[in-house]
Image (spheres, rainbow, N blue to C red):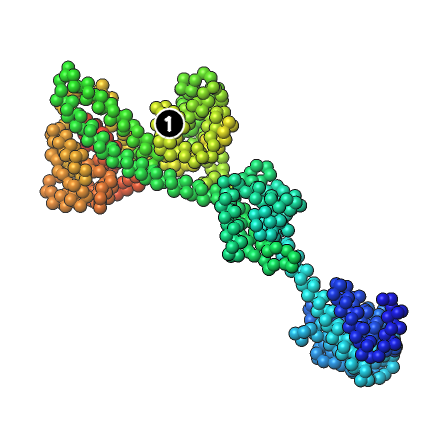
Amino acid sequence: MSTGIQKALSQSLGPLESLALLNETLLGMIRTQAPLPKILDVLCTHIEQRHPGLQCSILLLDADGTTLRHGAAPSLPGEYSRLVDGIEIGPCAGSCGTAVYRKQSVIVSDIATDPLWSNFRQLALPHGLRACWSTPIASQDGKVLGTFAVYYREPRTPDAEHVQVVAHATHLAGIAIEHDRAKAELRAAEARYRTLVERLPAITYVAELGAGGPWHYVSPQIETMLGFSPAEWLSDSMNWVNHIYPEDREIVLAAENLFQETHDLFQAEYRMCARDGRVLWFRDEGVLLEQSQGRGPLMQGVMYEITERKRLEDELRHSQKMEAVGQLAGGVAHDFNNLLMLIQAHNEHLRDYLAADDPARKDALQIENAVTRAASLTAQLLTFSRKQVLRPKILDLNAVLADVGKMLHRLIGENIEVHIVPASSPARVKADPGQIEQVILNLAVNSRDAMPAGGQLTITVRKVELDENDSRNHEGAPAGKYIMLSVSDTGAGMDTETQAHIFEPFFTTKAPGKGTGLGLATVYGVVKQSDGWIWVDSKPGRGTTFQIYLPCVHPESSSEKISLDESQSNQKPAAQAASSVDASPKGTETVLVVEDQDGIRDIVRESLCRNGYKVLIANDGDEALQMAGAYPDPIHLLITDLLMPNIGGRELAQRLTPLRPAMKVLFMSGYSEQSALDIGTTSHSATVLQKPFSLDALARHVRRVLDEVRS
């Protein structure tokens, strides 16, 4: 409706019809989302057209609650409207500022004389404004939103009709202002929500129920995570189902069906296939939205990317599994070594009573060879379980690699090209040189077997430093300086499932009879026992790279305190076995033997007695303490198993040493925990004799320990 027609119509109507027209006009504008300044301007114009000589003004209270801002004043001089824009409310701030301050109507019949205008009359009088009454505009909850003011060019007070019109106009202005502010708050809330949604490290979506239900919204993160723009994703309702990892699809669809039945929280963890082929894990949580008119039920959800969390969980489970397998392997090896010890000792007894030309002597030698091979297998199990006694020392990994490199060509074969790349400067680590050599050889042989048709084998040593980010990407290896040993081949490679098992004892992909499955298990054990970390990177058809990180050390580091004897040193080739008991070293000293295994205890006692020693026997640590305390004569040597019920060998040695400071110690062990290697309370070095050992080795070690001169 044009302004002229509206003016004519409003003047021809009675008061009630005019107010009805005003209501219809303004409420229609509010419904159609017209701008607030336009609505307020129409309101003022309508009142002014109905009541000639009256000039209207609407001021809006700012968010600070103290400042009034221009809202609408279609007939007031523009200069005056600019001057009053920004006045502050107060007890003497003209009609409008005072009305808001008092929260009640203020009527000033003569601006020139009223004290409320004392500070502002110089603004109004030059523009011919002489009277002004102002009414606060309030929201439904009573909060002041602004003022509706009426000006006259001569001094006067409002009549009854004016009072009624102003009251109605104030009410309409309140509706318009409150609706506009609600819209602004909604827009701000939507903007905050959108900002939050689009900054979350997750995909937010709104979709209709059902696996094939159309998606109505998806946040921009879908492009950075899965490689699809929101428009691409929304264009096909089957995108979600089609990109669920096939093995997870049944689980996800079951969760979707359950959600449709119960309308409870939708929860599922599953993998999605990205556009570039990556497979990502997501945790999906959704809730049911209120049903929109004309639409099916909607759900709103958030897909959190949890690939890294899943990787860490898998690594933790793998680490726990390896630890459990290690405990089992160590326990089996310990018990098996005790059995081998009995077989070895009884076989020696039988052999010693056989003549050199007795046909049965050959069988005895074969038994001894079998024991030696079995002991080698248990040694590998102990290495995997990190219970093998090592000889750690500071060494240059470059030098170890150079020594191993001399034999690699003969071991690997002519059809494989070997590249050895040492570090540019000494690469010092603390480890057992023999075991590190075995690690390199095992990995090299593993690579050789992966390249039956030939290829390249590259072994590299270099210094690296892991920061906090590297540490998180390397299974929690502490940040710091490391020496990295890398063994890389161009062979067949391994799939993910194979990689999950390669370090487990007896796991092998080789044909029956082609391997024990202990090579990589041994590598794992040596690396872990040397405080290192190992990772494998491999894909089918693209080769394999093993990376071993060992802590970088300074050459000034101290050496181990305890003297260690590997199980292999206790075994001698059957061809060199002693032909008679008389070849063993003899003695007359008193020896206290503490062993909880009856068979081993009896064999050690019998062997020592045959070699002239006086032997005291104890079944465990408690009995040994009582015997040592009550025995009146010197005890020259304590021979004790390290692992026993109640009191172990280490604690027994610590408790007996103050009572018998001259007594020496020889430990026996099916395996040795690392804590047993530091006999801190003894005043001398101790020797560990690993089972299974020959009786001749026992005799030699007993004699050597007894003959040692203390420093």
Q: Is residue 353 above or below residue 231?
A: above
Q: Is residue 253 above or below residue 34?
A: above
Q: Nearer the viewer, residue 641 or 473?
A: 473
Across and down, in percent, residue 637 comes to 17, 36
Mark 1: few/some/many CA within 10 Å (<14, 14-19, 20+): some
Q: Nearer the viewer, residue 373 or 437?
A: 373
Q: Residue furthest left?
A: 632
Q: Is residue 415 left or right of residue 101?
A: left
Q: Nearer the viewer, residue 535 or 288?
A: 288
Q: Is residue 377 left or right of residue 599?
A: right
Q: Amino acid at mark 1?
A: Gln
Secondary structure beneath disc 1? helix
Q: Residue furthest top?
A: 357
Q: Is residue 560 above or below residue 400?
A: below
Across and down, in percent, residue 568 comes to 28, 27
Q: Quadrant of the N terminus?
A: bottom right
Q: Quadrant of the C terminus?
A: top left
Identify residue for label 1: 438
- For residue 170, which quarter of the picture? bottom right
Q: From where the camera sits, is residue 711 visible? A: no
